[in-house]
Amino acid sequence: MDLQITGKVTQILEEQSGESKNGPWKKRDFILEIPGKYPRKVCITQWGDQIDQSNIQEGEQLTAHIDLQSREYNGRWYTDVKAWKIEKGSPAAGGGDPRELPPSLQSYDEDGENTFKIDDINDDLPF
């Protein structure tokens, strides 16, 4: 399963590093703001060489391919959002708005006006 999250980098947190039984490690978190009527912020973690390869900057639009992982510690659950691939720029070819309807849901009249209405979908539902 390929989970993707798209938004604008609003903050880059300080890099952390250490030594484990498997050798040295480093990680860096950044905050991605997802657009919408009620914008949300998500803290995403990058590990190792991925930090230098993507060279993320504040204010950049990007799409992060992520893995979600939860673990239990002392009866409480913690969830990590780990980026394994970063694509800079807007998600749609041509730099479109990530909230824009996919082409399969767009319909236009002769004047180029979008005629799609959400009720068009609801009319086709069997319930």
Image (cartoon, rainbow, N blue to C red):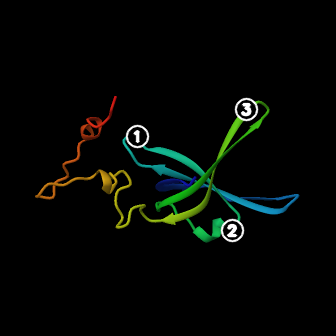
Between 121 and 63, which is closer to the camera in this rendering?
121
Residue under label 1, please give it: 38
- Chain-order first, disc 1 or disc 2: 1
Residue 115, how many percent across, how many down? 18, 48
Instruction: State left or right for residue 92 relative to residue 60.
Output: left
Please rate how many residues cluster around mark 3, counting C-alpha atoms within 10 Å: few if below 14, some from 14 to 19, many from 20.
few
Picture coordinates of residue 28, whole percent (x, y): 66, 58
The quarter of the picture where residue 93 lies is bottom left
Answer few, some or many: residues within 10 Å of disc 2's Cα (few below 14, many 20 plus, some between 14 and 19): few
Q: Secondary structure at mark 3?
A: strand
Q: Which residue is mark 3?
A: 76
Callout 1, which amino acid?
Tyr
Residue drawn 26% across the image and 35% down it? 123
Residue placed furthest toward the bottom: 53
User: Which amino acid, mark 2?
Assistant: Asp
Please report the residue visible at 56 percent of the width from the left and 57 percent of the height from the top. Answer: 65
Label 2 sits on residue: 49
* Left or right relative to 80: residue 42: left
As drawn, the residue found furthest toward the right would be 21
Left or right of residue 110: residue 91: right
Q: Are marks 1 and 2 in contact (CB under 8 Å)?
A: no
Q: Which SS class for mark 2?
A: loop
* 83 sits left or right of 87 in the view: right
Kindly give the residue lying farthest to the left in the view shown.
111
Residue 17's image quarter?
A: bottom right
* Mark 2 to mark 3 CA distance (whole Å): 30 Å
